[in-house]
């Protein structure tokens, strides 16, 4: 059975540590062959992750009318709450039955980039208490770690880490809480917590409550179950990074079918500045990060779809 490589983040990020070479080797396997890996011994503690999970859990437990006060369906962006059925990641499946809550980079008041949907203002609910403060603190810690991790992974696969670091000054990073209820009664073959898809951006830093459910598609067919307790992160790579590295890093399809247990996950979709050119390095092509991301968002969020 294919195993998802496990990487000690402290060893990976510090080239002077004895375990660095082993960590870099595991990263190469995860990034270039499987498209997934897990990292532990990170700068973000299990307690910090559990605090964030508790905050999302309290929000999703609110009555629907309270959550609807920050419904992203009323906007032209993806900030706030998304009800069950608000996303459809695959045209071969029904809209996903999970709920979500999304926040992004907060720009200074009056910043002209705030007119772009990828930098839209966040919507914050009045409750639960400390929800905003908890998510903002985690967003800052997670984006800092994600950039260091991305640069270390780039170095491990033969890319220039300095090149990537300069393209994340205002990252289009999206922090999400996913609430997967128990699989609905009567759910059929086209019903998923989230249907089979590849992520759209660069690197996804995924924290979960430890409940199984995530499945990664194997290259030769079949699925690999992946789970991680709070404090260990699942890492996968998106379409943008696959393009950027000329396919050196793999974007791998994955899904959540859902089962008898509720599940919470917290992905940080770590994406570069809106104007970063994510075409293969050395080519004469121009693929702006914002253009790729907004096209994929328009295909996914039901409230952004034409008509």
Image: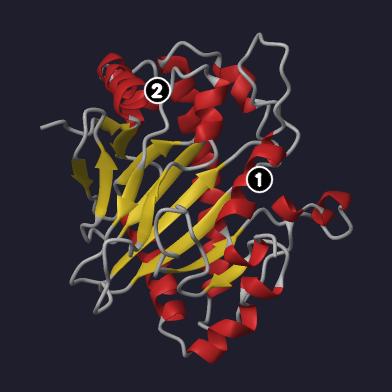
Name the residue that disc number 1 marks.
295
Horizontal and vertical percent position of residue 278: 64, 26
Name the residue that disc number 2 marks.
14
Q: Is residue 304 left or right of residue 269?
A: right
Q: Is residue 139 left or right of residue 70?
A: left
Q: Is residue 134 left or right of residue 232?
A: right
Horizontal and vertical percent position of residue 296: 60, 46
Secondary structure beneath label 2: loop
Question: In the rendered image, which quarter contains the C terminus?
Answer: bottom right
- Identify the residue shown where x is 81% and y is 55%: 114
- Identify the residue shown where x is 49% and y is 59%: 88
Residue 44 visible in rendering: no
Quadrant of the image occupied by residue 82: bottom right
Nearest to viewer (mark 2 / mark 1): 1
CB contact under 8 Å: marks 2 and 1: no
- Identify the residue shown where x is 70% and y is 51%: 118
Secondary structure beneath label 1: helix
């Amino acid at each position: 059975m294919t195993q998802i490589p496990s990487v000690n983040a402290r060893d990976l990020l510090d080239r002077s540590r004895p375990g660095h070479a082993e960590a870099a080797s595991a990263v190469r396997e995860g990034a270039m062959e499987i498209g997934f890996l897990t990292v532990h011994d990170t700068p973000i503690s299990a307690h910090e992750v559990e605090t964030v999970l508790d905050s999302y859990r309290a929000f999703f437990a609110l009555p629907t009318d309270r959550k609807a006060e920050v419904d992203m369906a009323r906007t032209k962006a993806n900030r706030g709450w998304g009800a069950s059925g608000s996303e459809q990641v695959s045209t071969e499946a029904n809209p996903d039955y999970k709920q979500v809550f999304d926040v992004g980079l907060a720009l200074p008041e009056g910043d002209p980039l705030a007119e772009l949907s990828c930098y839209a203002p966040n919507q914050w609910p009045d409750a639960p208490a400390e929800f905003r403060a908890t998510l903002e603190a985690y967003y800052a810690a997670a984006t800092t770690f994600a950039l260091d991790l991305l640069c270390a992974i780039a170095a491990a696969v033969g890319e220039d880490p300095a090149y990537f670091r300069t393209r994340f000054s205002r990252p289009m990073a999206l922090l999400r809480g996913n609430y997967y209820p128990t699989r609905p009664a009567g759910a059929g073959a086209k019903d998923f917590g989230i249907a089979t898809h590849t992520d759209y951006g660069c690197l996804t830093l995924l924290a979960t409550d430890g409940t199984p459910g995530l499945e990664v598609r194997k290259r030769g067919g079949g699925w690999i179950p992946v789970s991680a307790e709070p404090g260990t992160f699942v890492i996968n790579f998106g379409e943008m990074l696959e393009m950027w590295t000329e396919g050196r890093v793999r974007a791998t399809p994955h899904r959540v079918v859902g089962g008898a247990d509720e599940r919470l996950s917290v992905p940080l979709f770590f994406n570069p500045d809106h104007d970063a050119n994510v075409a293969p390095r050395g080519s004469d092509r121009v693929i702006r990060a914002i253009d790729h991301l907004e096209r994929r968002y328009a295909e996914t969020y039901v409230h952004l779809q034409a008509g």
